[in-house]
Amino acid sequence: MGASGWSYWTEYREDISEALEALREEAFQTGDYAPPWDAPDDYRPASLAELLDNCGESGTHSILDIDGVSTEPLEHGSTWKDAYGKLFPLTRGERRRQFDTTRPTRQQIEEKEFELMKLDIHRWSGRWVIAHDDDGNPLEYFIFGLSGD
């Protein structure tokens, strides 16, 4: 099947780890994932652990393949092993280049979504950026990445 790109908007919380956990729970509950390739059409796992176990190395092609988050950007020259299963923030420079500000609004992020997906994203990892209101207050996260096989 190959890897799949994915993106989500989720409510801002001071702790990005809490936002990731809430987003993963929502994705699981709503069925926003690729089921195991041999699953019946009505497949509904009893738990996230069961789903991940059944999907194995193919993954879910969704945020469910991500189980960690960093508040520090991925270091230049890092490998996929360093990034595996984690989210990393856009750097200050990436935000400035993409949006002409370090505090982009949701509209600015939506306008650049395609370009963001072209940024350096290791397979089985993702990136995050905070969307702000017009006064610079944080509102929500835009989380995007690439996973599955």
Image (cartoon, rainbow, N blue to C red):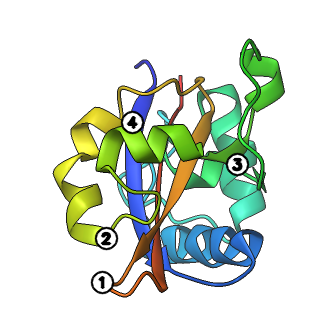
Disc 2 marks a residue whose amino acid type is Thr
Q: Position of residue 127 (x, y in %)?
A: 56, 45
- The 10 Å Cα crowd at callout 1, few under 14, some 14 to 19, many 20 or more, is few
The kind of secondary structure element at disc 4 is: strand
The kind of secondary structure element at disc 2 is: loop
Q: Disc 3 to disc 2, how far (Cα)? A: 34 Å
Q: Nearer the viewer, mark 3 or mark 1?
A: 1
Q: Disc 3 to disc 1, how far (Cα)? A: 39 Å
* Disc ID at residue 87: none
74 shown above or below 134: above
74 shown above or below 87: above
First in sequence: mark 3 vs mark 2: 3
Q: Disc 2 to disc 1, how far (Cα)? A: 7 Å
Q: Residue at x 70, y 63 (%)?
A: 48
* Disc ID at residue 105: 2
Q: Which residue is mark 1?
A: 134
Q: Position of residue 25 (x, y in %)?
A: 61, 75
Q: Nearer the viewer, mark 2 or mark 4?
A: 2
Q: Nearer the viewer, mark 4 or mark 1?
A: 1
Q: Which residue is mark 3?
A: 52
Q: Nearer the viewer, mark 3 or mark 4?
A: 4
The answer to whether any part of residue 90 appears in the image is no
Q: In the displayed structure, does residue 6 sit left or right of residue 99?
A: right
Q: Nearer the viewer, mark 3 or mark 2?
A: 2
Q: In the displayed structure, does residue 7 sit left or right of residue 57?
A: left
Q: Which residue is mark 4?
A: 5
- The 10 Å Cα crowd at callout 4, few under 14, some 14 to 19, many 20 or more, is some
Residue 5 quadrant: top left
